[in-house]
């Protein structure tokens, strides 16, 4: 038997959305919520759950703009734990945290923050979480998982079109869960374009692995190179064709951006609104 209670601090504030909480039964095999209890939203409210004689994992979902208090009581043993703590204590996961520094980020400019390389000798599950970073910039970031096939071919041809089926893009949330196959190399990238300037700083990357047969490391990055040129698409719709020469095997991230108007050595063309304002002021 489990008794769960919730008491938010209402005070004299007027709430657009009443504070509430609920227990969500969590399945770590699917890494998803499979059931939820009724929401508690009164000044002081509680619910009682009769559970079967086995291990149960619940996630507490709470929405409140103010303070609140929980209380739990049970006639069986229970403990409060983080996701990482539960996986390492009960599911046999290994945990490692890597510090990562990033340079100053300019607004509306592409930025690659880090690149993780995974080499898996056996199939495993990996969870990745960013720590000590402002969560408000999460919506401007994204993960990209790149799979390097055994034969080294990154693109597959279908009816004359080269399709890259080895990349997948995912949003940044609390935990990223990916399934890694045996004998395959993976690269996990964090990239994004921020709407504001961000000073240089550091973050921590927490990686949880279910199998000890997987190794990962943070790939050292070099200073990015920016190349600006003017192109005229040909009659077949090809915008540009450039040759890249490398010394040996290298891993590169290339971000391609199209801009309209004249492009000089200083960067991209000014927005149309700024150009109109300039003309108006000159009259």
Image: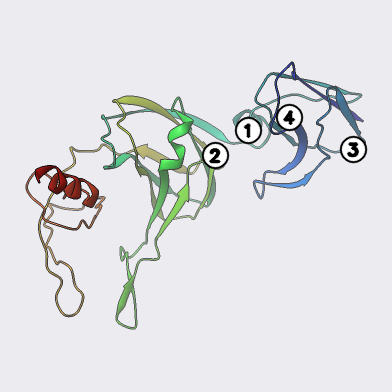
The residue under label 3 is 51
The residue under label 2 is 175
Dot 2 falls on a residue whose secondary structure is: loop
Q: Does residue 117 appear left or right of residue 66 in this picture?
A: left
Mark 1 closeness class: few <14, some 14–19, many ≥20 residues within 10 Å: few
Q: Does residue 139 appear left or right of residue 20 in this picture?
A: left
Mark before the other along the chain sequence, 4 or 2? 4
Q: Disc 2, disc 3: CB below 8 Å?
A: no
The answer to whether residue 99 is seen in the rendering is yes
The residue under label 1 is 83
| Residue drawn at x 6%, y 47% as measured from the top left | 265
Question: Distance from label 4 to label 2 (Cα)?
Answer: 25 Å
- What percent of the width, then of the height, locates residue 1? 92, 30
Front residue of 155 and 133? 133
Q: Disc 4, disc 2: CB below 8 Å?
A: no
| Residue drawn at x 66%, y 50% as measured from the top left | 30
- What percent of the width, then of the height, locates residue 271? 22, 49
Vertical side of 175 occupied by 162: above or below: below
Mark before the other along the chain sequence, 4 or 1? 4
Residue 106 location, quadrant: top left
Vertical side of 164 occupied by 60: above or below: above
Residue 191 location, quadrant: top left
| Residue drawn at x 88%, y 26% as measured from the top left | 76
The residue under label 4 is 19
Front residue of 86 and 63? 63
Q: Disc 2, disc 1: CB below 8 Å?
A: yes
Mark before the other along the chain sequence, 3 or 1? 3
Mark 4 closeness class: few <14, some 14–19, many ≥20 residues within 10 Å: many
Q: Name the image colouring.
A: rainbow
Mark before the other along the chain sequence, 2 or 3? 3
Question: Distance from label 4 to label 1 (Cα)?
Answer: 24 Å
């Amino acid at each position: 038997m489990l008794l769960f209670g919730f008491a938010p601090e209402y005070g004299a504030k007027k709430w657009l959305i009443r504070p509430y909480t609920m227990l969500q039964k969590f399945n770590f095999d699917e890494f998803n919520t499979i059931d939820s209890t009724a929401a508690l939203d009164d000044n002081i409210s509680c619910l009682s759950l009769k559970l079967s004689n086995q291990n149960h994992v619940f996630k507490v979902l709470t929405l409140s703009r103010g303070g609140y208090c929980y209380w739990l009581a049970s006639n069986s043993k229970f403990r409060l734990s983080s996701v990482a703590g539960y996986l390492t204590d009960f599911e046999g996961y290994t945990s490692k945290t890597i510090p990562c520094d990033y340079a100053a980020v300019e607004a509306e400019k592409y930025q690659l923050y880090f690149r993780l390389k995974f080499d898996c000798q056996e199939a495993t599950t990996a969870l990745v979480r960013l720590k000590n970073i402002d969560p408000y910039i999460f919506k401007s970031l994204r993960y990209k998982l790149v799979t390097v096939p055994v034969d080294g071919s990154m693109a597959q041809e279908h009816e004359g079109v080269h399709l890259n089926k080895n990349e997948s893009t995912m949003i940044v949330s609390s935990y990223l869960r990916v399934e890694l196959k045996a004998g395959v190399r993976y690269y996990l990238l964090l990239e994004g374009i921020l709407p504001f300037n961000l000073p240089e700083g550091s973050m921590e990357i927490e990686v949880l692995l279910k199998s000890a047969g997987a190794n990962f490391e943070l790939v050292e990055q070099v200073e990015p190179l920016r190349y600006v040129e003017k192109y005229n698409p040909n009659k077949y719709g090809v915008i540009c064709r450039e040759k890249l020469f490398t010394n040996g095997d290298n891993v590169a991230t290339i971000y391609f951006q199209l801009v309209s108007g004249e492009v000089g050595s200083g960067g991209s063309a000014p927005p149309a609104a700024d150009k109109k304002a300039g003309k108006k002021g000159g009259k």
